[in-house]
Image: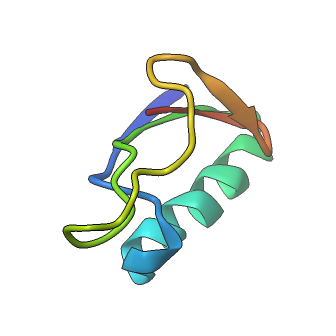
């Protein structure tokens, strides 16, 4: 099974749903499910620098991948 999760940001600034998707992805991956998160590099309100991540490069983490 493959699952694609799409969320506007996973920055700690946004809290709740942004952080829940990381825990859910790790739990699904631990059950041998192929999980990918697609998100942006947004890091909060106007004036905040974007997250320091590579864009369009899958990042493997805890058994799943994130694409910014």
- Quadrant of the rendering where the N terminus is positioned: top right
Image coordinates of residue 37 in percent, x first then y, are 47, 39
Residue at the image position 43 percent from the left and 78 percent from the top:
13
Image coordinates of residue 7 in percent, x first then y, are 31, 51
Left or right of 50? Residue 54 is right
Q: Quadrant of residue 18?
A: bottom left
Q: Quadrant of residue 47?
A: bottom left
Q: Residue furthest top?
A: 57
- Quadrant of the rendering where the C terminus is positioned: top left
Left or right of 32? Residue 20 is left
Image coordinates of residue 38 in percent, x first then y, are 39, 35
Residue at the image position 60 percent from the left and 51 percent from the top:
25
Residue at the image position 37 percent from the left and 42 percent from the top:
39
- Between 67 and 41, the residue placed more toward the observer is 41
Residue at the image position 32 percent from the left and 70 percent from the top:
44
Q: Residue furthest left?
A: 46
Q: Number of marks in the image?
A: 0
- Between 22 and 12, the residue placed more toward the observer is 12
Image coordinates of residue 33 in percent, x first then y, are 65, 34
């Amino acid at each position: 099974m493959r699952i694609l999760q799409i969320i506007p940001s996973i920055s700690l600034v946004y809290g709740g749903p942004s952080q829940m998707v990381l825990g859910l992805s790790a739990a699904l991956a631990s059950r041998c499910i192929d999980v990918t998160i697609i998100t942006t590099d947004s890091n909060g309100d106007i004036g905040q620098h974007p997250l320091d991540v590579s864009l369009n490069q899958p990042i493997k983490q805890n058994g799943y991948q994130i694409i910014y």
